[in-house]
């Protein structure tokens, strides 16, 4: 099944304000089309809203000030994805910079504890004898685990960004821009961004001069990896972190991950973070223990960082092979179900750490909400599911509607608009699948089921050059909600060939100018015609060097 797809050009918007003199008009128009003026195109740290806007920040800072003064044992509890790992590293590093002497960290094992601060994880933390537990990138849905921690006499500080349920957990303090009554304008902060903001407020309360800017490399990586919208607040954080990484000032672990992934620090982009760094950190939490990823981000020893980065690289290679096998099985499952509105799949042999990637691939290929389930552990009757959505269909709200209609069907769920996680008894899978598909059928119009590619228009032949590609690459912090520039146009096909039985290599021509193009996973067994209309990105061709550029084709159709 291939989704309906159409290319829509963004409305032309005249650039407003005093733009950098070296920026070409094209780049200014691209930013203007995304709603930015000259100031908001590349927002600065000075433009960030103050931490005082966060509800609960004073209570949270009070807990930490008292813990530092009492030399209490603070345990930062992370999560098993890249946002959770970077948030944990930022929390540990930042608290130590601000004078906390007894700071430890822990992270749940996906296969053993499940998500977040669960009662089982609390039991395992007891040996550490924490005085204050600080959750990062989770906690807002961990009612039972927080109650268990409180029953042991521990204080609990929740830092999170996920949407809360009907009630808040019984924590001593909660910092979450999405909790009721919070007036903080940056609702799209990732978990790592919330922790960074907490540290800013703590530094101010302590009157410290500690340099927290050294944590922004980790903030940038976690923010991009979690696919939160890159609003002005997040672009300021990501931009500052990218500048540090490009200057070679990242922590040893991130520098080692850049090296092992074959990227160049001086030209690192948000796409490099999303497709090279984040998957290697995530791989530890998917197949092994995220403790390995956090250790890589916490070490200050370059040799140790290289050893840990190499281990993460190897685990990621294993993950890729496993994902390819699971994806093949998923495609076979699709033949036997109705996926007109949503794809909800389960296989007893799937790995729970990789189902999120399977769901993402299904969502991208079908342009439908997708949920993939696997046993929580081999032979378990409990399933763990990972859900991904499309624009216009709020995944967590959809799960909440299923829960309201069928009380008790979903024991646990949480997330946000585009992604969510849930647990389910194996016997309940058919009923859940039917209920979710019904919600999707009601909530998805034909317009929402059409994959719309928003184009920034056509490029002239004289713009298909390296200077344009570099300006586009370096002239913005592109990502979720602030998309990388995409163009469309008609080209003559002068040559083509198939690479690795999957990709299509093209030689295209526009008004006498020839340009190589690549359409990844674009080979469908049909030869391209003499002319094509394509949606594409213009990028430097690092393999060819010199002045070379190439077009990365996102979509093609006969002209």
Image (cartoon, rainbow, N blue to C red):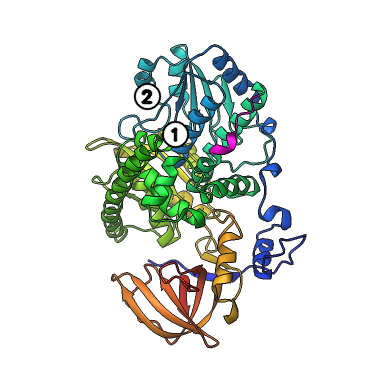
Identify residue for label 1. 407
Q: Is residue 105 left or right of residue 6?
A: left
Which residue occupies the foreground of this view, 127 or 4?
A: 127
Query: In the rendered structure, which segment of residues is drawn in magenta?
Result: 208-215
User: Does residue 353 appear in this view?
Assistant: no
Q: Quadrant of residue 385?
A: top left
Instruction: Farthest residue to the right: give it.
Output: 17
Placement of the N terminus among the 4 image quadrants? bottom left
302 above or below 118?
A: below
How many numbered circles are shown? 2
What residue lies at 39% left-to-right and 49% top-to-bottom? Answer: 279
Identify residue for label 2. 121
Residue 290 horizontal/vertical position (percent): 36, 36
Mark 1–mark 2 Cα distance, whole angstroms, equals 26 Å
Residue 2 is labelled as: none
Residue 6 horizontal/vertical position (percent): 53, 71
User: Does residue 128 appear in this view?
Assistant: yes
Q: Quadrant of residue 502?
A: bottom left
Which residue occupies the foreground of this view, 45 or 126?
A: 45
């Amino acid at each position: 099944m291939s989704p309906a797809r159409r290319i829509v050009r963004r409305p032309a918007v005249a650039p407003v304000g005093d733009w950098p003199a070296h920026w070409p008009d094209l780049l200014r128009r691209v930013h203007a089309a995304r709603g930015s003026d000259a100031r908001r195109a590349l927002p600065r740290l000075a433009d960030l809203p103050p931490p005082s806007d966060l509800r609960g920040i004073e209570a949270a800072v009070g807990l930490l000030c008292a813990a530092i003064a009492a030399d209490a044992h603070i345990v930062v509890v992370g999560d098993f994805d890249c946002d959770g790992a970077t948030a944990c590293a930022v929390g540990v590093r930042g608290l130590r910079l601000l004078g906390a002497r007894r700071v430890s960290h822990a992270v749940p094992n996906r296969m053993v504890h499940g998500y977040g601060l669960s009662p089982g994880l609390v039991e395992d933390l007891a040996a550490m004898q924490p005085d204050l537990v600080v959750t990062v990138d989770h906690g807002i849905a961990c009612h039972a685990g927080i109650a268990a921690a409180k029953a042991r006499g521990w204080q609990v500080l929740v830092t999170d960004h996920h949407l809360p349920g009907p009630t808040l957990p019984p924590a001593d303090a909660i910092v979450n821009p999405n909790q009721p009554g919070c007036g903080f304008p940056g609702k799209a902060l990732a978990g790592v961004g919330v922790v960074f903001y907490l540290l800013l407020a703590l530094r101010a309360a302590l009157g410290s001069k500690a340099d927290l800017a050294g944590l922004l490399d980790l903030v940038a990586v976690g923010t991009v990896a979690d696919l939160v919208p890159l609003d002005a607040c997040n672009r300021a954080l990501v931009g500052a972190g990218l500048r540090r990484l490009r200057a070679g000032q990242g922590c040893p672990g991130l520098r080692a991950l850049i090296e092992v992934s074959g990227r160049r620090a001086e030209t690192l982009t948000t796409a490099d973070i999303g497709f090279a760094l984040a998957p290697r950190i995530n791989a530890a939490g998917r197949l092994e223990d995220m403790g390995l990823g956090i250790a890589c981000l916490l070490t200050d020893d370059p040799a140790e960082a290289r050893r840990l980065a190499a281990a993460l690289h190897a685990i990621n290679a294993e993950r890729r092979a496993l994902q390819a096998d699971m994806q093949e099985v998923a495609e076979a499952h699709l033949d036997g179900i109705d996926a007109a509105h949503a794809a909800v799949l389960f296989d007893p042999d799937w790995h729970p750490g990789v189902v999120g990637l399977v769901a993402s691939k299904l969502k991208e290929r079908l342009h439908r909400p997708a949920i993939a389930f696997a046993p929580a552990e081999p032979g378990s009757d409990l399933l763990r599911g990972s859900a991904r959505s499309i624009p216009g269909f709020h995944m967590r709200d959809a799960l909440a509607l299923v829960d309201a209609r069928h009380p008790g069907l979903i024991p646990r769920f949480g997330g946000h608009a585009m992604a969510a996680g849930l647990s389910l008894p194996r016997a309940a899978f058919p009923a859940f699948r039917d209920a979710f598909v019904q919600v999707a059928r009601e909530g998805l119009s034909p317009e929402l089921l059409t994959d719309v590619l928003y184009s920034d228009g056509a490029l002239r032949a004289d713009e298909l050059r390296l200077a344009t590609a570099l300006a586009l690459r370096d002239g913005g912090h592109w990502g979720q909600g602030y998309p990388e520039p995409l163009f469309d146009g008609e080209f003559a096909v002068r040559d083509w060939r198939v690479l690795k039985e999957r990709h299509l290599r093209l030689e295209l021509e526009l008004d006498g100018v020839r340009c190589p193009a690549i359409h990844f996973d674009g080979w469908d067994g049909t030869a391209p015609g003499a002319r094509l209309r394509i949606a594409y990105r213009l990028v430097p061709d690092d393999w060819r060097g010199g002045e070379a550029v190439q077009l990365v084709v996102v979509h093609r159709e006969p002209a």
